[in-house]
Amino acid sequence: MRTLITLMTMVLLVPIMDAQDIQYSDKLSIRKNKIKKGDVILSSFELLGGLMLVEGELWNQKDSFVIDTGAPYLVINSDFYISNLDGVTAGGISGAASAQLIDIDQFSLGEYQVDDFSAFVMDLSHIEKVKNRKIKGLIGADILSNYEMLIDYDNKLLTMFKPRTTEYHTDVYPLDEIPFELYGHFPVISVKIGKKQYKLGIDTGAEVNLLNTASIDKEDFKNLGATVQSKKLHGVDKEKKTVACTKISNSMINGEVYDDMEFILTDISFLNNAYGIKLDGLLGFPFLKSKKFSINFKKKKLYVWGDFLDVDKQLPLTLSEKE
């Protein structure tokens, strides 16, 4: 039996919805680029609720994977891997689930290829059931952190690029840059709500924003006039969980006001204990879709970009194309 290993965040906070409300395309495509192989990865994605699904290749088969910075590693759905899932524990906000550590010879996302590394296998059937869709796995931070990752929800385009391979930061500059710290694999930014600063992790695999109930200044929230409602979510342990949610009229990030952000209020002590960290919450799809963000793990910066993407070409102008 392997040593106990904690894995993932809440792995995907998934709001419960009816199957008939879910829409998705039949096929995903990876767009090619004209520069040095692997320097820029351009991938269209399918937006399934608040989840980004891209086409990845594993074991010579192309399937749908979720882009999930809340997962530290590549996670493979156990439906695609016959094994006995014991000896490893995956931790989430709602509890624990079994997982297994395995060796992977090769994984590809477009022209980005990763060889000889470890990944986790766990049951993701609860997510598939809610989404009415087969999902082969989650692409976690260890793979994504090798690039700056720009997410364009409007055009459903994911751009992963290395320094000086595109016009980003060379001819076109961000509107804002938000510094972050790394708590384990989590990019963590400071968010002011009321009079208090909260440390919130960026999680592309979360369909909701989240605040830890133990971190909330209740008197401050009362003064903000925040109203509380209830919502049901799915967590990593497959259980439905009823939680409170509230809308904050304004949250301050790096001097910029973000209006009417909805947060789920719940206990994330299991997550914090699993990683030995102290997060006050998570920022997921509702936050990330509000602007065009890129995440640079090496520089520890979250960048905000304007609308300059050439939609007709479906890719940004690269340095090699300009030359």
Image (tube, rainbow, N blue to C red):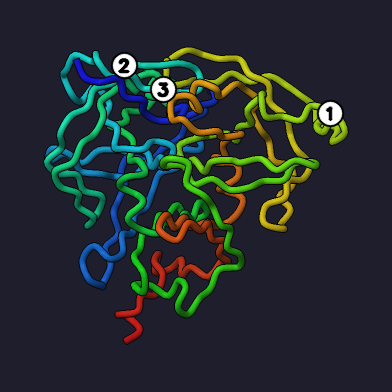
Instruction: Name the residue located 48 percent from the left edge and 68 percent from the top edge.
Output: 309
Say which amino acid is labelled 1.
Answer: Glu
Horizontal arrangement in the rendering, residue 217 relative to residue 39 (left or right): right
Q: Whole-percent x and y of residue 290?
A: 61, 50
Image quadrant where one finds the C terminus = bottom left
Q: Which mark is residue 155?
A: none
Q: Nearer the viewer, residue 76 or 117?
A: 117
Q: Label 2 crowding class (10 Å Cα cut-off): few <14, some 14-19, many 20+?
A: many
The residue tagged 1 is 219
Horizontal and vertical percent for residue 12? Answer: 46, 30
Which of marks 3 and 2 precedes in the sequence? 3
Residue at the spot of label 3? 91
Give the residue type at disc 2: Ser
Callout in the foreground (1, 2): 1
> Helix or strand or loop: what does disc 1 sit on?
helix
Q: Residue at coordinates 43% horizontally, 30% vertically from top-left?
A: 275
Q: Residue at x 13, y 37 (%)?
A: 59
Residue at image point 52% right, 28% down: 21
The residue carrying mark 2 is 98
Give amino acid for label 3.
Gly
Earlier along the polypeptide chain: callout 1 or callout 3? 3
Name which of mark 1 and mark 2 comes first in the sequence: 2
Q: Position of residue 280 (x, y in %)?
A: 61, 34
- Label 3, residues with CA under 10 Å away: few <14, some 14-19, many ≥20: many
Q: Nearer the viewer, residue 287 or 164?
A: 164
Q: Quadrant of residue 4?
A: top left
Q: Quadrant of the N terminus?
A: top left
Whether 61 is drawn above or below 22: the answer is below
Mark 1 → mark 2, Cα distance in angstroms = 39 Å
Q: Secondary structure at mark 3?
A: strand
